[in-house]
Image: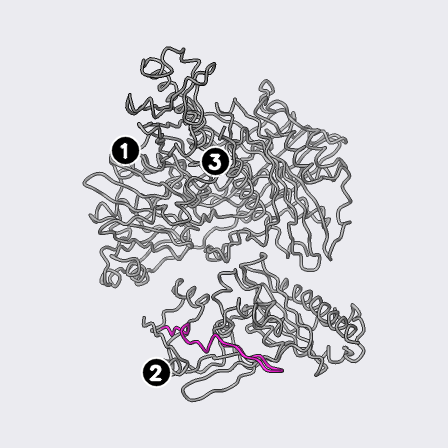
Amino acid sequence: MIIGKPLDRVDGPAKVTGAAKYAADQHIPGLTHAVLVTSAIARGKIIRIDTGQAARSPGVLSVITHHNGPRFAYQPPKHPWIYGQTHVPLQNDVIYHSGQIVAVVIADTLERARYAATLIQIDYAVETPEISVEANLDKAFIPERGPFNLRYEYRRGDAHGALATAPVRVSGRYRTSMQHHNPMEPTATTAVWDGDHLTLYETTQALAFTRQKTAEMLGVDQKQVRVVSPYLGGGFGAKGYVWPHTFITAAIARSLGRPVKLVLTRAQSYTMHGHRAETVQELSVGATRDGTITAFVHSAVSQTSMLNEVSWEEMDATTQLYACPNAELTRRVVRLNLGTPTPMRAPLSVGGYALESIMDELSHATGVNPLELRLRNYSTHNPENPSQPWGTGKFLRDCYELGAKLFDWPHRLPRPRSTRRDGGWIGVGMATAFHPTYVSAATVSIRMDADGKALVRSATQDIGTGTYTIVTQTVADALGVPAKSVRFELGDTNFAPSAPSIGSRTAASVGTAAHHAGSALKDKVIAIAVADHRSPLYGIPAAQVTAADGQLFHRLDPRRRETYADVLRRHGPVDSEAVWPAAPGISRSYGAVFAEVTVDDATGEVRVTRLVGAFDIGRVLNAKTARSQAIGGMIWGLGTALTEHTIVDEHLGRILTANLSGYLVPVEADVPDVDIAFVDKADPAASDIGAKGVGELASNGATAAIANAVCHATGRRVRDLPITPDKLL
Amino acid sequence: MEFLRPVSLGEALEMKAARPEAVPIAGGTDVMVELNFDHRRPAALLDLTRVAELAEWSRDDSVVTFGAALPYTRLINELGTDLPGLAIASRTVGSPQIRNRGTVGGNLGAASPAGDTHPVLLASDAVVEVASARGTRSIPASEFYLGVKRNALEPDELITSIRLPKATGPQQFAKVGTRNAMVIAVCSFAISLHPNESRAGAAIGSAAPTPRRVRQAEDFLTEVLDWESPQALPDSAKRRFGELVASAAEPIDDVRGSAAYRKHALAVLARRALGWAWDAYREGERSCA
């Protein structure tokens, strides 16, 4: 078995030697360069836009504004799903947020385009922007659910009644910040037309989305659009949906008759493809004195844009994680003059932070150890649907056990603000991690040539998580060949259609399709061999033939054997293809995260000194890539807890932290050694290979665990993220 | 934009005299950021990386002189023993890659109030050696910083070297950042003890329009520190010192931190750094005795 082994990334050598060609690395003859000019104001109108000087600047091929902007065949619908936002820039003079595209300059070199972009003069009629969630709470409303069917309201039982009569009641008002994805690879589009066929080299987490929506906007058939994206330097949601810069670039390339490349600057990435919304959440829990939860009432408000009513910050952990008969959830939005939010990292993590914080507050109120409190309220069935047992879909108990052991979680917690070391307060905290994970249709095709090597293809993506590697392992096992006999190609819509890399679905969906395609190919070759009188396997019932290490052999008499290559040299190449799943599915991943912090009570600086995560992600397909993903997710959780927030100027509505020195993603020196454990039990209900999602799950839990540890260290509950030093003084 | 590449200091000074608008560049860790963000577009860049003498250093019994283009990494490795305060501050600059490129000369040229090495240079009585085709002059660090990103250089002058007395006592540097590395200081503080003069130098960064010495706090230390028979400092003295340091600050609110937090944190950093330095001095006196 190769599945589960910590195989090194098969794409590693290409990436570290620079051989891997990312979207912006394509060398296209006659390539031109687009540079975006963005709005300096957050609300108002363009009165005058003077492009004369820019148009006369050396090398400039075209300057595009709303006066001469591309007109599209389609208007995206009201609700952003697949389209990241409704608004199509360059169609009129209205400004909805700072950083909106107001002009595009195309020149023969990037430098000349950048220079010309600075020559465009714009006069605005400025209006006062709305940029504060808190100041607009009275205008909050419940959005329509939209095509993604987001849930904004839920109730079971009588949550308010149960809360009113509960012997123990705890309430908290939690705030989480606007955040940005910040993948290392900048977002890029290169549009190349050949007649009426378009090739897009695109940074996308979803080839099919890009193809479908670009075709729709441009009024061409999907078959005329090819999207290529073999490598991605992260996406985290920023590259999940289709945003205007992509189809605008394609439209300009078409009208210009030249290939056009657009690479967003880091600053532009703060306004071009969404962000995690700021939220204000009020959460109450009712319980008996022994900590048995009787009610949750959770009410949240998050920011949305002037054009779109949407909140991706789902809060289903409150209604699905713990056994609790009465629950009410309401999610509302306020419109601000900022861009449209989009999923980031893990949509449930900001609601999960509030839930796991109030659990800690309940633990303080009842005196029940935080771990014991969670076990006391453990759900074996879906609290939203008591006839549905979690079954093999939930090994959270194992996570608690594994994590508590690794961390050496104390059965008796010292009182808050009672432990000091090296001049700082020490505290520990824990939290449950919870996230839904999905599967949707993936197609994987395999061709095995006469040399016995398998070429595997699927129009899916590797966003940096290890898709190349796990599919290679899966196919190698299904075929019974060494991993080096399998080559996996992805990232091209010329391959069979496959799953998007959003919602933690790639491994389970594509992995299972790969497994089935591999098994089917093995069966085909066995059938050929046993029917071929030249084969040593001739006449053996197919069911008694199996394969290992590139050899097909009789189970009962392994000396009767030959290689795949032997069969295929006689017969010629063999193909197979599999699609899985037949219908989309949802499952849930779990984890337990434990943190220790030291808080300097004089400066308020928080240092995370230990971090342990134990996760139930079904069957682990690659111990190394899964571990890396888990560590990365927990570091994000740390960032959300302590350092990351997008700061907006309260008068101008401009983002003040639109770079990596202002928006603080944690660095090495902020991160302690992170210990990871996996339950590694298959969940056959999630996927045929027993795997489910890990990416989103892992960035849940750490935020609340760290916040809880800070409270334990200092005796102060900061309910406003991130917990910067000034909040602890 | 012209890219001038002198190979000797003389040539560099002639170029600078002929093109005073040329912006000197060594490690480029500040200049390149400004160019990339289009904050400035100089008509010429004066590349100093080929001028060998700017990356050299020398020392005698009491003084270390190092070239303005000596990268932080070399400063830490080669001069860390003689200049411990500067080494501590240099280790907090950026990342290893940035420390391989960045230089103290660049820190001085940029004269950002947040530059990490400034408080140490001030506290340690550094002298900035500058030169032009007209000649050379020595500018004490305390007279070098004139305003936000403004320094005492004439348009035709280049920073050639930095001269510091070898440490004769313990030195400390501390900063608060919004994360543990790759960060611009929220505020910073440096102290250098000068036992042979029975005094201490102290300075703050990122807490006023320029890095600045905190003279009142220094005077306070002259009064309270007994250099002959050093005693443990009472907490009240450390606190008072911290207050005096904080009172010298004129910080602003910005995305990295509030003015109030900066003042508070400076007092803490000052109190602690003094404690560390003084304890080390007492330890040293005892072991010598």
Q: Which residue is mark 3?
A: A143
In percent of width and height, residue A23 lies at 34, 46
Q: Nearer the viewer, mark 2 or mark 3?
A: 2
> Which residue shows up at 50% across the image and 44% down it?
A277
Q: Which residue is mark 2?
A: B18
Q: Quadrant of residue B34?
A: bottom left
Q: Does A281 appear in magenta?
A: no
In percent of width and height, residue A122 lies at 33, 60
Please report the bounds of the magenta region as a residue range.
Answer: B45-67
Q: Secondary structure at mark 1?
A: helix
Is disc 3 surrounded by few (<14), some (14 to 19) or many (20+) residues within 10 Å?
many
Q: From the viewer's perspective, is B26 left or right of A101?
A: right
* Amino acid type for the residue under numbered disc 3: Pro
Q: Chain ID for label 3?
A: A
Q: Chain ID for label 2?
A: B
Is disc 1 surrounded by few (<14), some (14 to 19) or many (20+) residues within 10 Å?
some
Question: Eyeballing the image, is B196 above or below A210?
Answer: below
Q: Chain ID for label 1?
A: A
